[in-house]
Amino acid sequence: MGKSGERSTKQILNKKARFDYHLFDRIEAGIELKGSEVKSLRAGTATLSDAYARIDGGRVALVNFQIEPYPMATHFNHDPKRPKQLLLHKREIRKLASKLSTKGFTLIPLAVYFNARGRAKVELALARGKTKSDKRQSLRAREDQREIDRATRRR
């Protein structure tokens, strides 16, 4: 990411995504938000755990991305689970749609953050679900790496 595209330190991560999916292509997209959603997102009260993106009619929407209502807003607060529109160029949407047509692929969010210009961004990844044995293999590899790290620190 360039100078204007650097991430801020406060971000919301989808930690389970790397465990549950094999990740392939990544893309950054803007998010269309309402006023109280921006305030709540800056406060860090959002969850990405069950979120995914889908393409409908040439538009990309982020589904199940929950942003909690902002407590200081008026009674006209936002709906926490409403689908959020993602801002991508038509060329990028067509490219993603062709890749998603392949069986087993899905589009999942990895992180939501504010860039250096203060714009809300989401990092999406083209992903394929892992099987149970793949997950076990990932756990085993992580445990082996921890053992190696411990052994090197002891010496």
Image (cartoon, rainbow, N blue to C red):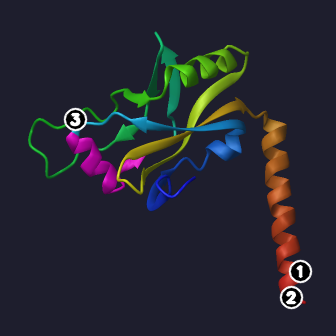
Residue 141 picture location, percent across and down: 85, 56
C-alpha distance separating marks 3 and 2: 53 Å
Say the numbered circle drawn on residue 151. 1
Element class at badge 1: helix
Give the residue type at disc 2: Arg
Sequence-first tag of 3 and 2: 3
Q: Is residue 21 left or right of residue 70?
A: right
Q: Secondary structure at mark 2?
A: helix
Nearer to us in this view, 112 or 90: 90
Q: Residues within 10 Å of mark 3 (few under 14, many from 20)?
A: some
Q: Residue furthest top?
A: 57
Res. 135 visible in picture: yes
Instruction: For label 1, count other residues whose C-alpha is less than 10 Å away and answer few (under 14), some (14-19) or many (20+).
Output: few
Looking at the image, residue 60 sits to the left or right of residue 130; the answer is left
96 in the magenta segment? no
Q: Is residue 111 above or below residue 83?
A: below
Which labelled disc corresponds to residue 20? none
Res 109 → quadrant: top right
Q: CA separation, marks 2 and 1? A: 5 Å
Residue 83 occupies quadrant: top left
x 73%, y 16%: residue? 102
Residue carrying label 3: 78
- Give the magenta range: 35-47
Q: Which residue is mark 2?
A: 154
Q: Amino acid at mark 1?
A: Ala
For the point 25% across and 32% down, which residue is it?
Answer: 79
